[in-house]
Amino acid sequence: MKRYNVAVVGATGAVGEEILRILEEIDFPLNNLIPLASSRSAGNSIDFNDNTIVIKELTETVFFEENIEIALFSAGGSISAKFAPFAAEAGAVVIDNTSHFRMEADVPLVVPEVNPEDIAAWRNRGIIANPNCSTIQMVQTLKPLDDAYDLIRVDVATYQATSGAGKTAMEELVTQMQDFFAFKLNESEHNSFPHQIALNVIPQIDVFMENGYTKEEMKMVNETSKIMHSDFAVSATCVRVPVLRSHSESIT
């Protein structure tokens, strides 16, 4: 079996840590694993398969230097915009977990259970975009229904965990709950969300658009159309809830 040189960009973030956990869990055929992060984290180490691996600094040349074949990006849209082209130029297949490339016409947006045939278009730019987490959940349900019944309209409400906003947001929820049990929740700061998240439900994820929907809600609308090559209407309401992990959805 062929083994691959794999880079995980954003290895110290919440998504990067989960990617590493899954690579370990499924025993992915690795030749070399290269965790990449900012200069602040470079030189630190991670534990992987009972080995200690030193984190390298993300640079424009590291993909060439390490002969990277697969690059998994989860460090934010601005990082993907800057560094993913260098990874692709080095010959790596880039799988980007951010929103930066999702709606670009020559970059496939893929959920393997729904549109695996679109993966072939990765050769256009060397990049495969990973959809929004809530979109992924929804389209796997909608695909067989649309095939059987030709959907006309979908209304979805999501209840999204703090993990969707990153490690700092998860830590903020934990801190606020600790403050609650110490009877000082009113002193807690909120930086990751527009309001206190502990013991609260916030019907806003990302910024509001001119049409009254939030950016997160419009991601679900636009990404669903691209993934399913469909024209049925989608209306989304996205809500942040005070749990660490596990998004939920109600779809009609």
Image: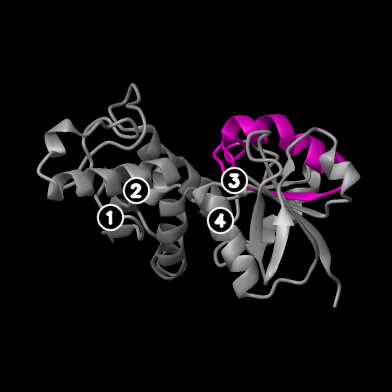
Which residue is rendered at x = 66% and y = 47% of the image? 44
Q: Quadrant of the C terminus?
A: bottom left
Circle nearer the N terminus (4, 2): 4
Q: Badge 4: how crowded within 10 Å, few (<14), some, or many (20+)?
A: some
Mark 1 and mark 2 residues within 8 Å of each other at the beta carbon: yes
- Estimate the spatial distance between the alpha carbons at disc 1 and disc 2, rounded to whole Å: 6 Å
Q: Secondary structure at mark 1?
A: loop
Q: Which residue is mark 1?
A: 243
Q: Which residue is mark 2?
A: 162
- Estimate the spatial distance between the alpha carbons at disc 1 and disc 4, rounded to whole Å: 18 Å
Circle nearer the N terminus (3, 4): 4
Q: Work out which residue is located at the far bottom of the displayed protein and give it.
A: 1
From where the camera sits, is residue 184 visible?
Answer: yes
Q: Work out which residue is located at the far left of the displayed protein and give it.
A: 183
> What stretch of residues is rendered in magenta?
74-103
- Estimate the spatial distance between the alpha carbons at disc 3 and disc 1, rounded to whole Å: 21 Å
- Estimate the spatial distance between the alpha carbons at disc 2 and disc 3, rounded to whole Å: 16 Å
In the displayed structure image, the side of residue 70 where residue 153 appears, left or right: left
Asked if residue 242 is positioned above or below residue 115 in the image, the reply reads: above
Q: Badge 1: how crowded within 10 Å, few (<14), some, or many (20+)?
A: some
Q: Which residue is mark 4?
A: 17
Q: Which residue is mark 3?
A: 74
Mark 3 and mark 4 residues within 8 Å of each other at the beta carbon: no
Q: Quadrant of the N terminus?
A: bottom right
